[in-house]
Image (cartoon, rainbow, N blue to C red):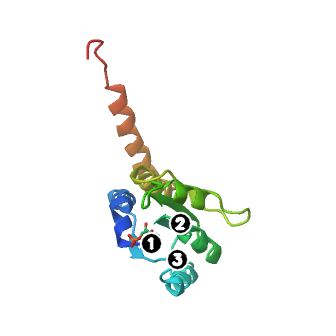
């Protein structure tokens, strides 16, 4: 149901955070390496097959001039969530701007740089699927409750 794609195997250190969320929620998913500039034909094939294969959301992570999420979004109507990966001296700011600055008409839902963004992409994919899956929605509500209770249990000693 969810395709997690990345421009390089090296991006998996970040993108694993998205995969872990999908696993935790029991959402069927696949993980693929698809490079926009090194395997453009594969990118087209993957994007064109997304609807017929039943993908409901694509999470795409890339570093540098991160055109993978935008090109996927250009080739499919399946919603694409983009995760900027810090892979160059610009530490992901390059990828963030590449992904977030999609010209109007072809949106990519852009998350934060790095593991937090990847985790949130996973959670956002779960939330999107949960709009038509009440069991999944219950799991998401329970997941949020655990985080709420963790914070409610926190205290700060003045002398810490
Ligand atoms: C991008 O270039 C990838 O998404 C990766 O973040 C970056 C560097 O790729 P590798 O040289 O590590 O394979 O396409």
Q: Mark number for residue 36?
A: 3
Query: What residue did someone put label 2 on?
Result: 66
Circle 1 sits in a helix, a strand or a loop, which is it?
A: loop
Circle 3 sits in a helix, a strand or a loop, which is it?
A: loop
Residue 129 makes an appearance in the image: no
Asked if 153 appears above or below 136 in the picture, the reply is: above
Some atom of ligand 1 lies within 8 Å of the CB belonging to the residue at label 1:
yes
Left or right of residue 30: residue 67: right
Query: Separation of disc 3 and disc 2 at Cα?
Result: 8 Å
The reply to whether discs 3 and 1 touch (Cβ–Cβ < 8 Å) is yes
User: Looking at the image, which residue is at 44% across and 71% down?
Assistant: 5
The reply to whether discs 3 and 2 touch (Cβ–Cβ < 8 Å) is no
User: Looking at the image, which residue is at 53% across and 87% down?
Assistant: 41
Q: Mark number for residue 62?
A: none
The reply to whether discs 1 and 2 touch (Cβ–Cβ < 8 Å) is yes
Is residue 54 or residue 69 the one in the foreground?
69
Q: Mark number for residue 7?
A: 1
């Amino acid at each position: 149901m969810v395709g997690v794609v990345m421009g390089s195997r090296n991006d998996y250190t970040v993108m694993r955070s998205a995969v872990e969320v999908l696993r935790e929620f029991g959402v069927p998913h696949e993980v693929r390496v698809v490079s926009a500039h090194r395997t453009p034909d594969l990118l087209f094939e993957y994007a064109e097959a997304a609807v017929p294969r039943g993908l409901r959301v694509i999470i795409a992570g890339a570093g540098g001039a991160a055109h993978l999420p935008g090109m996927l979004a250009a080739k499919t109507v399946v919603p694409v969530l983009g995760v900027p990966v810090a892979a160059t001296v610009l530490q992901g700011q390059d990828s963030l701007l590449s992904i977030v600055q999609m010209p109007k008409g072809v949106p990519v839902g852009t998350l934060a740089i790095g593991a937090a963004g990847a985790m949130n992409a996973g959670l956002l994919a779960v939330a999107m699927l949960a709009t038509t899956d009440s069991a999944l929605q219950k799991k998401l509500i329970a997941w949020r409750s655990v985080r709420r209770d963790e914070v409610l249990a926190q205290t700060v000693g003045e002398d810490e």
